[in-house]
Image (spheres, rainbow, N blue to C red):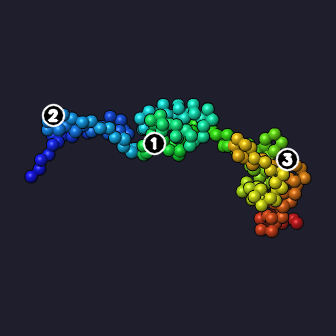
Amino acid sequence: MCHCQISHVIIKRPVPDQIEARTVWISGYYSDHTFLTPIHKDQDVSGYEEMVDRIRKLWEMGYNDEQMAAQLTAEGFHSARSPHVTVKSVMKIRLARKWYLPREQMRRVEEIEGFFTARGLAKRLEVNHSTVYRYIYKEIIPPECVTRDTASGVYLIRNDPLLIEQLRKRAVEHKKKNGVLRPTASA
């Protein structure tokens, strides 16, 4: 025997990321509940444009992705498949609009105030930037020639012609040793 107290339930989806449920009891009273529901695209999240605008403002204030995600969550925003704003969502929105963090901006440049970035030195030496990092970590580039930008964490290598020439010779020797540089037909 069923002694059901519920008369019926009404479910609505007013926006893509929310479900409203009204439970109507036999007595005539009702209770309303709103639930977030996962969706596929961040663009369909309620308040998406406001969240994008807020990300821009926080980015301009110097927040990083983790700080922005925490602040947006505290302000009531959420991501498509999460009840909070994820770091990945913030990063995707920010990068799609080319709002780069200082570290990302610095990685794109080759030289800063008399210092090479790893990208710049790699280009000068005609090697992969991972080779430059290996030179730094193994102290092939002397530690006194390397510094880090405090804001971005990017390595900066002194533009010393003697050091550059030594590193260039090392890179060429390594390429010869591994068969990357082959003698030309006329040699």
Which residue is identified by label 1? 84
Among the two numbered marks 3 and 1 on one chain, the one whose residue lies closer to the N terminus = 1
Mark 2 residue type: Gly
Among the two numbered marks 3 and 2 on one chain, the one whose residue lies closer to the N terminus = 2
Q: Dividing the picture into quarters, in which one does residue 168 lie?
A: bottom right
In percent of width and height, residue 69 lies at: 52, 40
Quadrant placement of the C terminus: bottom right
Question: In the drawing, does residue 24 fall left or right of residue 97?
Answer: left
Mark 1 residue type: His
Residue appearing at x 11%, y 50% in the figure: 2
Instruction: Kindly check if marks 1 and 2 are in contact, taking CB atoms under 8 A apart as contact.
Output: no
Q: Can residue 44 be seen in this view?
A: yes
In percent of width and height, residue 48 lies at: 46, 34
Instruction: Kindly state the secondary structure of the residue where label 1 is placed.
Output: loop
Q: In this view, does 123 lie above or below 112?
A: below
In percent of width and height, residue 6 lies at: 17, 42
